[in-house]
Amino acid sequence: MNYKRIIPCLDVKNGRAVKGVNFVNLKDAGDVVELAQLYSTQGADELALLDITATSEKRSTFVDLVSRVASHITIPLIVGGGISSIDDAKKVLDSGASKISINTIAVKNPSLIEELASSMKDFSLIVAIDVKKNSLFSSGWEVTIKGGQERANLDALTWAKEVEKRGAQEILLTAMDQDGTKEGFAVDLIRLFSSSLSLPIIASGGAGKMEHFSEVFMQGGADAALAASIFHYGDIEIPKLKAYLDSLSISVRRSR
């Protein structure tokens, strides 16, 4: 059965979980390892661990933290931030990650997608795409990089199709205009990508209530939904969210 996945996301800065709105005004959200263990226990399907300043500050990925988190959870771990080579990816995977995610470096060096995909036969490669609305592009969305700090001058859907062609296994799609607003996922964006690509789409940005998850699955066609602050601050509990989705006949793995 093709289950819809719920993925809590831990954005990490200086070893702590943080969360902001539209990628700015970051606030402390708690201890990374404690939150990771909680979500694993609650029945999250996967956990995303993203070092949100690794690229902009030109730091290597936080391998020690990855190892500590991996040792405390029993679900797949997605790791992103600062991965710019096969060697970086190998260090993260050896530390316990199940999947790696790249973003800015994929735009800067698209051939790395193929290199990583061919060298990671037993693991999954996710390409994260952060987008903002821009009517000057044919899809209506433009790619941004470096945590949203720079415009990439790329049409979002065109880039996604290239990512798919080069061998990525999933796309983590974040609507930056929605990020942290709790006003709902950009369902039109997710629907555009899910109907145009064969890759699984992880929807990100804007979750605020349980209805937003049912919308992005039923109307947007997302394969997974990622969220942060609503889980960190206890707005929504994963077991209750899954029970709600199950009541709507949306296929989910029920919490332990």
Image (cartoon, rainbow, N blue to C red):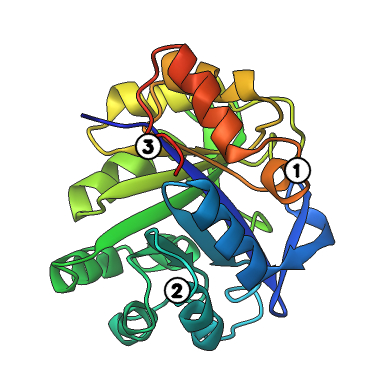
**Residue that mark 1 sits on:** 234
> What residue is drawn where x is 24% and y is 70%?
116
- x and y percentages locating residue 125 in the rendered image: 29, 60
Q: Residue at x 35, y 24 (%)?
A: 251
Query: Which residue was labeled with disc 2?
Result: 70
Q: Quadrant of the C terminus?
A: top left
The reply to whether callout 1 and callout 2 are in contact (CB within 8 Å) is no
Separation of marks 1 and 2 at Cα, in angstroms: 23 Å
Q: Earlier in the sequence, mark 3 or mark 2?
A: 2
- 180 versus 109 height, above or below: above
- Residue 152 visible in the displayed image: no
Label located before the other in sequence (1 or 3):
3
Tell me: 106 left or right of 34.
Answer: left
Say whether residue 46 is left or right of residue 81.
left
Q: Amino acid at mark 1?
A: Gly
User: Which residue is at a point 50% across and 29% down the rendered structure image?
Assistant: 242
- Disc 2 on helix, strand or loop? helix
The crowding category of the residue bearing disc 3, from other C-alpha atoms within 10 Å (few below 14, some 14 to 19, many at least 20), is many
Disc 1 versus disc 3: nearer the observer: 1
Answer left or right for 211 relative to 87.
right
Q: Is residue 159 above or below residue 236?
A: below
The location of residue 147, given as percent across then percent down, is 63, 59
Q: Which residue is mark 3?
A: 201
The image quadrant where one finds the N terminus is top left
Going 24% across and 45% down the picture, which residue do you hit? 164
> Real-space Cα distance between discs 3 and 2?
24 Å
On the image, the x and y values in percent for residue 227 come to 60, 43
Q: Earlier in the sequence, mark 1 or mark 2?
A: 2
Q: In the image shown, does 55 or 95 lie closer to the viewer?
A: 95
Residue density around tag 2, few if under 14, some if 14–19, many if 20 or more, within 10 Å: many
The Cα–Cα distance between marks 1 and 3, rounded to whole angstroms, is 25 Å
